[in-house]
Image (tube, helix red, strand yellow):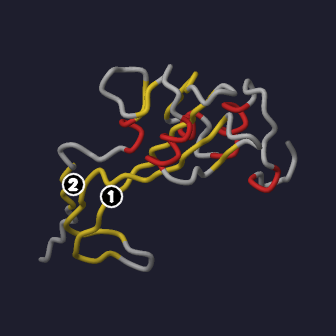
Amino acid sequence: MVFLTIACAFTPVKSPNMPSARIGDGANEEVRVGLPSREFALTVLGKPSYSSQHDLAVGYLFTAKIGTAKGVLMGPCNPYIGSTEVFDDDDVWLAFDEQGTLKRVEKHLVKKHHGDAEAAWRSFAASVPDTLRPEQMLNGLT
């Protein structure tokens, strides 16, 4: 008699490098609410995934490694023995005033919108007095 056990071990990253941790309203964040930081934020974080016409609102969609899975894993065709890195979504949305001062930050809206990044962007940018870029919307409507 042969028994087959399927096992997988997940090893989490002790301190995942979540890019959104660099942004917030605390004294330790690089990009902070209340500071004139639009240009600095764009320099630190790079080109945003979403932005309004005048960059009063910007949104970043990142992925961050959260661990490693080892053992019997499911591949696209069948199980295999090996290891793979595990990632999670990390998104952050920033709203600035006309002077470039960071006024509002929201994080992890994509999860609140069931994985729909465009819906998260529309929800965040609705209160910003700037026009959305139609080329960034799937349906082209603003």
Q: Tell me which residue sits at (53%, 38%) in the image.
A: 111
Which quarter of the picture shows residue 5? Answer: bottom left
Q: Image quadrant for the C terminus?
A: top right
Q: Image quadrant for the N terminus?
A: bottom left
As drawn, 94 above or below 75: above
Q: What mark, if any, has residue 86 been given in the picture?
A: 1
Which quarter of the picture shows residue 80? Answer: bottom left
Sooner in the amino-acid sequence: mark 1 or mark 2: 2
As drawn, 124 above or below 90: above
Q: Depth-wise, is mark 1 or mark 2 nearer the camera?
A: 1
Disc 1 marks a residue whose amino acid type is Val
Q: CA distance from mark 1 to mark 2?
A: 9 Å
**Residue 140 x, y percent position in the rendering:** 85, 52
Q: Tell me which residue sits at (20%, 65%) in the image.
A: 70
Q: Tell me which residue sits at (35%, 30%) in the image.
A: 29
As drawn, 19 above or below 65: above
Residue 36 vs residue 21, the one in the foreground: 36
Q: Which residue is mark 2?
A: 10
Q: Counting other residues with Cα less than 10 Å from the Cα at mark 1, is it few (<14), some (14-19), or many (20 or more)?
A: some
Disc 2 marks a residue whose amino acid type is Phe
Residue 98 vs residue 79, the one in the foreground: 98
**Residue 36 x, y percent position in the rendering:** 53, 27
